[in-house]
Image (spheres, rainbow, N blue to C red):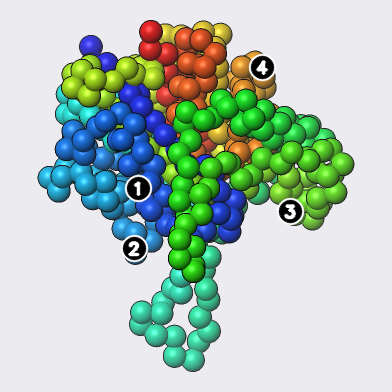
Amino acid sequence: MPRNAYLANAKRSPVGSFGGSLKPMRATEVATQVGKALLADGGIAPDDVDLVIGGMVLQDMTESNPARILSLNLGIPDKVAAYTVNMQCCSSMAALIQAAQAVALEEADVVLVAGMESMSNAPHMVPGSRWGHRLEHAEFVDTLRECTLAGSKMWGDPWYMIDVAEHHAKHDGVSRDEMDEYAIISHQRALAAMDAGRLDDEIVPIDVPLRKGGTKRFERDENPRPNISIETLGAIAPVKDGGVITAGNAAPINDGSAVALVCSDKGMAKLGLDPLARIMMPGTALVGCDPHFMGYSCVDALNASLKSAEMSVDDLDLIECNEGFAVQLLACREMGGWDGERLNVDGGGVGIGHPVGMSGLRIAVHLANALKERGLKTGGATVPAGSGLGASVLLERAA
């Protein structure tokens, strides 16, 4: 039997809009503020941490191995290893799973996990410039756009996420009206959670530096819209001619960071903490599927988690599924047999936002808090990723 692995404590930044409040900061800078608040909240010394694992997608070499940057910024000892996972949108959930496995296998007692992304600071590249272009033209490649590849030009299948979303809409028979109606639900649930204070325990205000000196306090998710309606969504043109996916029924581009501690029983006793939740093991999963049906991977992942734990979807009190697109959530809700009243109860990626390297950990963090806030027992968090990948964890609220 593996040892218990607990989600001991977790925090996140507010989610910033593209080019919004968090634009002046790199992903590791935001994560550093969240990590410092997390350690201070539990009275945890940096040298209590045995391992650091991060998830981030849009890395560049000025921020190489962001988990190590975060580790050193937090004052964690040089001898502690740190590494960064890139599994596209699954990245930080994969990091969480690896942290739980390290604890379960007695390789560590206290693991710090981070999910980081600054999509506002995604760089452009100029391929071939090292050796010169002579009389040829050079092309700026937008790494942010290339991040949305659902296939890959490297294997001859250059579908972007928008192509997959449109494919899901046709194959699964989801109309634009249904997508727009769900987008409103995602925004309204997020706003209701914010206004009721249900996100307060997980969010750390961020001090954003100003160009002329000083800082500005950023405290609240920037994306949820109070004035959203069928009329306002209906006025938005589709991204593709003749399509049904719009900027209103898809997750936006965002910035943010989440940081968590995963501990063994020994680590919990050492830190003197009460856990938020137990990470069920067996009960984690990493899967793949046809990239053209990327959305299905979150159903496959959750089903794999449930099978390994000898449970069914009916055993889950809450489900958190990352929303890349409203169509993906609706198609997967139908495919998975998920009860909409137990699904993304405080909003999802369409309403809150989707900083790609942060989202997997964010939904797990929120699931743990939502179970605690509602006095419920068991939940599942699942996230799909471009190229047909999925990750899932099951959480059980600590007594």
The span from disc 4 to disc 1 (Cα, nearest Å) is: 35 Å
Q: Residues within 10 Å of mark 3 (few under 14, many from 20)?
A: few
Residue 33 in the image, given as x and y percentages of width and height: 38, 46
Q: Which of marks 3 and 2 is in front?
A: 2
For the residues bearing labels 1 and 2, Cβ distance under 8 angstroms: no
Identity of the residue drawn at 37% across and 52% down:
28
The span from disc 3 to disc 4 (Cα, nearest Å) is: 30 Å
Q: Mark 2 highlights which residue?
A: 61
Q: Mark 1 highlights which residue?
A: 32
Report whether residue 7 is seen.
yes
The span from disc 1 to disc 2 (Cα, nearest Å) is: 18 Å
- In the image shown, does 2 or 19 lie closer to the viewer? 19
The span from disc 3 to disc 1 (Cα, nearest Å) is: 35 Å
Residue 21 in the image, given as x and y percentages of width and height: 55, 54
3 or 4: tag closer to the N-terminus: 3
1 or 2: tag closer to the N-terminus: 1
Disc number at residue 341? 4
Q: Would you place residue 218 above or below residue 343 in this image?
A: below
Residue 25 in the image, given as x and y percentages of width and height: 45, 57
Q: Which of marks 4 and 1 is in front?
A: 1
The span from disc 4 to disc 2 (Cα, nearest Å) is: 43 Å
